[in-house]
């Protein structure tokens, strides 16, 4: 006898400060998506306004620069992509591709706004996590730029 279980948002990454009930409520504002190996989650140059939380699996972020595909990094369980375009919708600056079978949870800007209006306290913690993620990534880029110019 097999039973299908409803996916749950884990207490990891930007969701770590949220309690079980807060994560369960939040999950209803988005959708869980399976992603097959080789499938693009986000495509560079395409309009993008969603945040993706990696529930399981692994992705590579790449960008075309000077006619060459450049690996920007890996995204794994508990990490997110799409933070910038969630807050400032625009075209994606990179392509994000599944390296292995993965599951993500996706929320768009409108759904996030509804969640913020209905659950402001929990949403504040979520947005702090998004802000921290953006800050960490910006610091890493700044360090790479500094290292490039100091070499």
Image: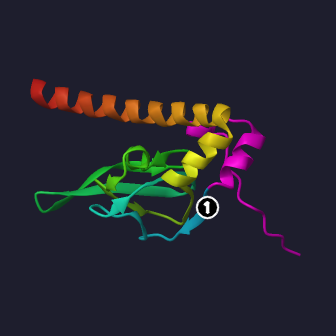
Q: Position of residue 68 (x, y in %)?
A: 16, 61
Q: Position of residue 22 (x, y in %)?
A: 72, 41
Residue 62: tell me if it is visible: yes
Residue 151: tell me if it is visible: no
Q: Is residue 126 magenta?
A: no
Q: Secondary structure at mark 1?
A: strand
Identify which residue, 122 or 23, lies in the foreground.
122
Residue visible at 55% across and 46% down in the picture: 113
Identify which residue, 121 or 72, lies in the foreground.
121
Total marks shown come to 1
Q: Which residue is mark 1?
A: 31
Q: Which quarter of the figure has residue 104? A: bottom right
Q: What segment is highlighted magenta in the picture?
A: 1-29
Position of the N terminus, as image quadrant, is bottom right
Identify which residue, 108 or 58, lies in the foreground.
108
Q: Is residue 49 left or right of residue 107?
A: left
Residue at the outermost front position: 117
Q: Is residue 97 left or right of residue 35?
A: left
Residue visible at 54% across and 66% down in the picture: 101
Label 1 neighbourhood size at 10 Å, few (<14), some (14-19), many (20+)?
Answer: some
Q: Position of residue 23 (x, y in %)?
A: 70, 44
Vertical comparison of 106 with 40: above or below: above
Residue visible at 75% across and 62% down in the picture: 6
């Amino acid at each position: 006898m097999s039973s299908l279980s409803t996916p749950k948002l884990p207490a990891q990454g930007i969701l770590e400060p949220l309690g079980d009930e807060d994560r369960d409520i939040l999950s209803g504002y988005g959708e869980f998506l399976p992603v097959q190996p080789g499938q693009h989650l986000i495509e560079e140059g395409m309009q993008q306004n969603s945040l993706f939380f990696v529930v399981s699996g692994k992705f590579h972020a790449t960008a075309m620069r000077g006619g060459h595909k450049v690996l920007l990094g890996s995204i794994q369980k508990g990490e997110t992509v799409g933070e910038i375009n969630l807050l400032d919708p625009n075209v994606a600056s990179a392509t994000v591709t599944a390296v292995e079978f993965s599951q993500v949870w996706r929320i768009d800007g409108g759904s996030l706004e509804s969640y913020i209006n209905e659950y402001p306290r929990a949403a504040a913690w979520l947005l702090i996590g998004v802000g921290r993620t953006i800050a960490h990534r910006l610091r890493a880029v700044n360090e790479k730029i500094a290292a490039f110019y100091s070499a």
